[in-house]
Amino acid sequence: MTRKASEVLLDLEAKLNKLLAEQSNTNNLLKVIANRLGSPQQPIMQQPVPQQPQQAPLMPGLKPGVRLENGVLVNDSPASDNEVFDPNGQLAGQKVETEYKMEMETSPKGERRGARYTNQEPQKRNVTITQKVLYPNGKNVCLARIEVFDMEGNLVTSAKTNSTGKWSAQLPSEQDYVINVIKKASASKPEINKSFEISVPNQSAPLQLKDLQ
């Protein structure tokens, strides 16, 4: 079938208009993209930087931990119970507690040597008393009875001499005592009945009395 020339021209004109419309749409799209790419960027909001609190300047000569704030001295460190400060906040000195130390020669059971005592008097010791009893001829007095009384007449302790004529007893120190030595007479030996006073000092060593004859 043969088409007319007028129909062919109209068909070509319609296709050309379609192409022009598509080209126009493409150009508009490119402009939009170009505008977006070339537009200036939005500024980024800056977050405020937190500022550190200003530290009060330290004054020379002040105790560490004491600072000057608004014209007033502030002590940030807890003070010790023994520390004494002047009105400027400076360390003026420390309290001194007097303490007495007693070295014990004989420590009680369960207590270590060198125990520390505060404002306590020295402890009174028990002192070992020893003595030898002799007859007038110089022989040993065996099995003589020894009686120890305090100054109020109370019996404190008793003992007997051994085969060598010696006796011993432990007595509280810093006291006075009366000692009686008694031995009945026998067929060949005279009676022994003597009494004397002693004063026991506060010492750790035994107290050796003079021989009684």
Image (cartoon, rainbow, N blue to C red):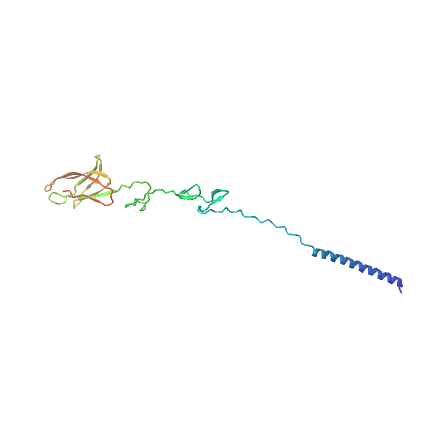
From the viewer's side, name the closer residue of 48 and 183: 48
Image quadrant where residue 181 sits: top left
From the viewer's side, name the closer residue of 73 and 165: 73
Q: Residue furthest left?
A: 188
Side of 34 relative to 201 (left or right):
right
Image quadrant where residue 162 sits: top left
Image quadrant where residue 198 sits: top left
Q: Residue furthest bottom?
A: 2
> Measured from the top left, where is residue 50 in percent x and y?
57, 48
> Measured from the top left, where is residue 111 in percent x and y?
32, 45
Side of 30 relative to 120 (left or right):
right
Side of 99 relative to 132 (left or right):
right
Image quadrant holding the C terminus, namely: top left
Side of 92 relative to 195 (left or right):
right
Instruction: Give the residue displayed 78% in from the left and 58% down from the top.
Output: 24
> Measured from the top left, where is residue 155 in percent x and y?
22, 37
- Look at the picture and state if 152 lies above or below 46: above
From the viewer's side, name the closer residue of 174 and 79: 79
> Measured from the top left, where is residue 110 in percent x and y?
32, 45
Instruction: Give the residue displayed 84% in from the left and 60% down from the top.
Output: 13
- Look at the picture and state if 3 lies above or below 169: below
User: Total marks drawn?
Assistant: 0
Image quadrant holding the N terminus, namely: bottom right
